[in-house]
């Protein structure tokens, strides 16, 4: 119960600076509890950077913002070994990735080589420089952003990298009422400057371990695997979800149950996270795109094919 109060306090704290986006904040927290990474695709100015900063402040963890540009180098991300003339040895100078919460801003603006420098960090929570491996701090989370409108000078994220993001979200514009509240909050000064921590990284790391112990019935696992397999067989989809997607959906469902204060999963947990976990991993066939189908519509059709399991009491 104490841990759920902490989670609730984090969400309330973030809502001081992100107005009217409770669902996005909850899914971001579920991603963090899952030890996953988050991709936010949206237009500029809707609070993507503020969300990442608010999460880091709320859990009292370090925050680095990397502004990706075409001339950003892999060494800018991972770090570089520099020769020290006084000691006669190479010394490692950490890159921007060596922190808890990393905002990879406009990640699709940099070259594929630089994008690839994030892969090991996201998957293994470590980086390798000049044959040496350096562990990343815990907790560790990458929040990447990309602009869905401006395609000039951008590089689409490869499927292998998209697959490493646990969820893909869109914040969207606020309602008029929420925008008015936001204006009232920000009219004097930015609330992010006065945001205080409500917990620490050690507590978050402990929660992440507890999420792994949440029970998920084998019938629910079979249900997840049926849906994943359905994405691979659907004629509207050129590339279906990977085995990594199966594990991601299971872990996100466990985190959703933990977020709600349960030590066991129910079908509602899967329904809550299935779209943000799966949709960005699907590549539609050319015919489907011509017919103006979307991954969301195709995924809904697949989900509706399978019976939701009724768990024994």
Image (spheres, grey):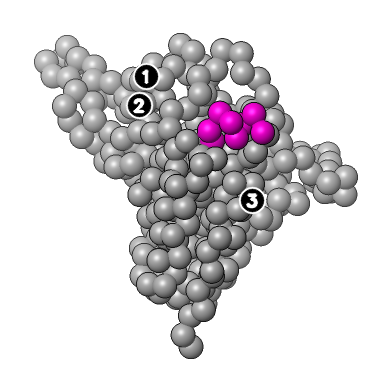
Q: Which residue is mark 2?
A: 117
User: Badges 2 and 1: C-beta atoms under 8 Å apart?
Assistant: yes
Image spot of residue 178 (x, y percent): 82, 48
Q: Which residue occupies the foreground of this view, 116 or 80?
A: 116
Residue, far bottom: 313
Q: Which residue occupies the foreground of this view, 32 or 218?
A: 218
Q: Which residue is mark 3?
A: 24
Residue stretch rendered in magenta on the structure: 284-291
Earlier along the polypeptide chain: callout 2 or callout 3?
Answer: 3
Label 2 to label 3: alpha-carbon separation? 27 Å
Label 3 to label 1: alpha-carbon separation? 30 Å
**In the rendered view, would you say 219 is above or below 187?**
below
Q: Which residue is mark 1?
A: 113
Please identify the dominant SS of the magenta region: helix
Q: Secondary structure at mark 3?
A: helix
Residue at left offset 17%, top offset 12%: 85
Q: Is residue 42 left or right of residue 177?
A: left
């Amino acid at each position: 119960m104490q841990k759920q109060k902490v989670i609730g306090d984090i969400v309330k704290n973030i809502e001081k600076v992100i107005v009217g986006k409770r669902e996005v904040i909850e899914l971001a927290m579920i991603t963090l509890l899952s030890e996953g990474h988050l991709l936010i695709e949206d237009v500029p100015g809707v609070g993507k950077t503020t969300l990442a900063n608010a999460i880091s402040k709320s859990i009292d963890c370090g925050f680095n913002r990397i502004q990706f540009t075409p001339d950003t180098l892999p060494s800018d991300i991972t770090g570089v070994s520099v020769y020290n003339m006084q000691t006669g040895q190479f010394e490692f100078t950490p890159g921007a990735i060596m922190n808890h919460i990393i905002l990879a801003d406009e990640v699709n603006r940099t070259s594929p080589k630089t994008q690839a420098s994030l892969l090991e960090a996201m998957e293994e929570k470590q980086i390798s420089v000049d044959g040496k491996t350096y562990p990343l701090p815990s907790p560790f989370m990458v929040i990447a952003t990309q602009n869905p409108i401006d395609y000039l000078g951008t590089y689409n994220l490869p499927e292998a990298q998209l697959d490493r993001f646990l969820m893909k979200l869109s914040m969207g514009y606020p309602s008029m009422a929420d925008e008015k509240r936001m204006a009232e909050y920000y009219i004097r000064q930015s609330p992010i400057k006065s945001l205080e921590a409500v917990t620490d990284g050690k507590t978050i790391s402990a929660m992440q371990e507890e999420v792994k112990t949440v029970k998920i019935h084998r019938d629910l696992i079979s249900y997840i695997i049926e849906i994943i397999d359905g994405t691979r067989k659907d004629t509207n989809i050129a590339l279906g979800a990977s085995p990594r997607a199966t594990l991601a959906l299971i872990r996100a469902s466990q985190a959703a149950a933990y977020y709600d204060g349960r030590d066991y999963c129910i079908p509602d947990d899967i329904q809550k996270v299935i779209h943000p976990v799966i949709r960005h991993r699907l590549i539609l066939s050319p015919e489907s795109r011509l017919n103006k189908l979307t991954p969301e519509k195709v995924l809904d059709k697949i989900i509706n094919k399978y019976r939701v399991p009724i768990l024994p009491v």
